Image: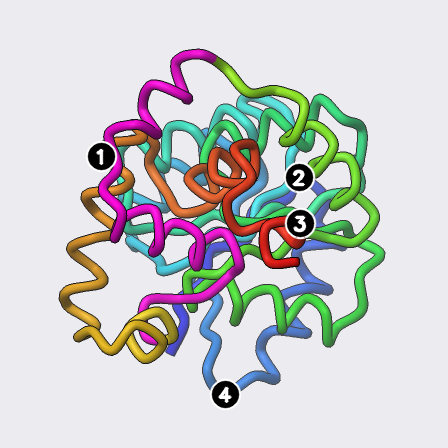
Amino acid sequence: MIRLLLVDDQDVVRIGISAILSTEEDIEVVATAADGAEALYLVERHLPDLVLMDLKMPVMNGIQATRLIRERFPSVKVLVLTTYDADEWVFDAIRAGAAGYLLKDSSREDLLKAIQLTMQGQTAVDPAVAGKLFNHVVHNITPVESRLMENLSEREREILKLIAQGLNNRAIAEKLYLSEGTVRNYVSAILAKLEVSDRTQAAIIALRHGIGGLSEDK
């Protein structure tokens, strides 16, 4: 059962999405919030598995709320669901720790798939913003990131490549003939060495350095 917190400042959106999700046997909407500050309070109270987060809201916006949730409750995943596809919103949401980015005109099937992918440790990005994110990724290598990448062992780079390709821990374990617990330990070490809080940010760094991209596999 996926315990989900829905955050949106529009009543009709909260009601509509709650109605969609309530038809799924493996999803429970444990609470809804109208702004980021309320979301932060409800995350502490209910500790959901996933927060479905709008961005432009009063009191505290979704970027600020995502950053605080990821800092205080690292086990809670955040999936952005918004109408905004402008570059700054996309990049800031990912930097804040969002595991995925979906637009509100997505179909019911795409929304449910994105929720499942996020809970499996994969990254769900709306096709409408994927190109912007990729272009930003490949053109923004920093010297600090390059130095951090040098700290990775050969095995850690191999696992990072698979993370960047969207594989979850179980799939990585099967591919490399390792136990899932061993992969989980490697992933934790990779995140620590890259100084990031989640797999999405690690994957972005990997892609910036040509690890896990299509060009590497050709």
At label 4, counting other C-alpha atoms closer than 10 Å, the crowd grade (few under 14, some 14-19, many 20 or more) is few
For the residues labelled 2 and 1, the Cα–Cα distance comes to 35 Å
> Which quadrant of the rendered structure holds the C terminus?
bottom right
Colour setup of the view: rainbow
Check if mark 2's residue and mark 4's residue have beta carbons within 8 Å. Answer: no
Q: Residue lying at the far top in this picture: please name it.
A: 143
For the residues labelled 2 and 3, the Cα–Cα distance comes to 41 Å
Residue 192 is labelled as 1
Instruction: Report helix, strand or loop for mark 3.
Output: helix
List the residue tagged with mark 2. 9
Percent position (x, y) of residue 42?
A: 37, 45
For the residues labelled 4 and 3, the Cα–Cα distance comes to 40 Å
At label 2, counting other C-alpha atoms closer than 10 Å, the crowd grade (few under 14, some 14-19, many 20 or more) is some
Query: Is 129 placed left or right of 158 in the picture?
Result: right
At label 1, counting other C-alpha atoms closer than 10 Å, the crowd grade (few under 14, some 14-19, many 20 or more) is some
Q: Is residue 60 above or below residue 186?
A: above
Q: Amino acid at mark 1?
A: Ala
For the residues labelled 2 and 4, the Cα–Cα distance comes to 26 Å
Q: Give, as a single range, the part of the protein colored magenta.
A: 143-170
- Residue, x 58% and y 78% (percent of image)? 22
List the residue tagged with mark 4. 25
Q: Amino acid at mark 2?
A: Asp
